[in-house]
Image: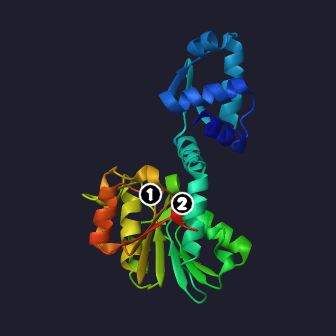
Amino acid sequence: MLLDLDMVMDSLKVGSERQHLILRRALAERVVKVKDLAAELGVHEMTVRRDIDQLAEQGLLQRIHGGARILEKTSEEVGHQLRATKHTEAKDMIARAALNLIEDGDVVALDASTTALALARILHARNVSAIVSGLDAANVLAANGVPFLMVGGNFHAPARSFVGAFFMDTMTRLHPDKVFFSAKAFSPETGFTDPHLPEVGAKQTLVRSAGTVFALLDSSKFERRALATIATLDEVDVLITDQPPSDRIRIVTEAADIQLIVTQETP
């Protein structure tokens, strides 16, 4: 995780290693004290204050008496970028397997997950059009010349996506051939779940708009559960993952008539 966080810090243009550590502490503890940081870093308190001043000028921290607190937008941005740097190889393999199931002429819909984003990056290999709810996917498709419709709504910063009543009302009027979505967790008892309620509502509507529904999940999400259900097993047609799941998951997906595709088993 520290390696991923270093990559994120670089993308946020955080300066010295000392400032990296200050921002890490603020992300973990929300509020940090100058005297504690000075003791941990072995530097004068004035040096820590200068570092905090520089981070505050970048909009990453807010100065408070005796220290600093993390800004919510900083926490959201780092959280999003960390998700984008986790399990990247698995996501890329899942995306390639998903692409093999897309045909020229399809209208495909992608949720705002980082796994669907991996698919968006290679979607130009097919002659298709897309429906998206995430800013990152829209940017990738625009750069690659893939025609797309972006469905708007309330902006949900942690996922850089659009959600809410306007999004859901619009999606009920659209009928893509194939929908590709991901989730934070999957278990046979709760189905495909996510902790962020705004995202859950948007993903539910996306799933129910489709002709064929594809769940894109790396194996780290199996046998876990989150707050709210996006889709039950009978709402999903195909599950693509990177590693062979447990016998229990194989049995329940087969019983639900879900096609299970494991990229490790793909020739």
* Total tally of numbered discs in the picture: 2
Kindly report the distance in space between the C-alpha atoms of the residues bearing marks 2 and 1: 7 Å
Q: Residue at x 65, y 81 (%)?
A: 126
Looking at the picture, how far across and down is residue 194, in whole percent? 37, 55
Q: Which disc, if any, is residue 264?
A: 2
Q: Name the residue that disc number 1 marks.
A: 244
Question: Label 2 sits on what residue type?
Answer: Gln
Looking at the picture, how far across and down is residue 183, in whole percent? 42, 59
Name the one closer to the observer, 265 or 54: 265
Do the CB atoms of the residues marked 2 and 1 lie less than 8 Å apart? yes
Name the one closer to the observer, 19 or 153: 19
Name the one closer to the observer, 58 or 173: 173
In the rendered image, the vertical position of residue 189 relative to residue 126, given as above or below: above
Circle 2: element type: helix
Work out whether residue 135 can be spotted. no
Q: Residue at x 31, y 75 (%)?
A: 257
Label 1 neighbourhood size at 10 Å, few (<14), some (14-19), many (20+)? Answer: some
Looking at the picture, how far across and down is residue 190, in whole percent? 27, 58
Label 2 neighbourhood size at 10 Å, few (<14), some (14-19), many (20+)? Answer: few
Work out whether residue 155 can be spotted. yes
Looking at the picture, how far across and down is residue 235, in whole percent? 32, 74
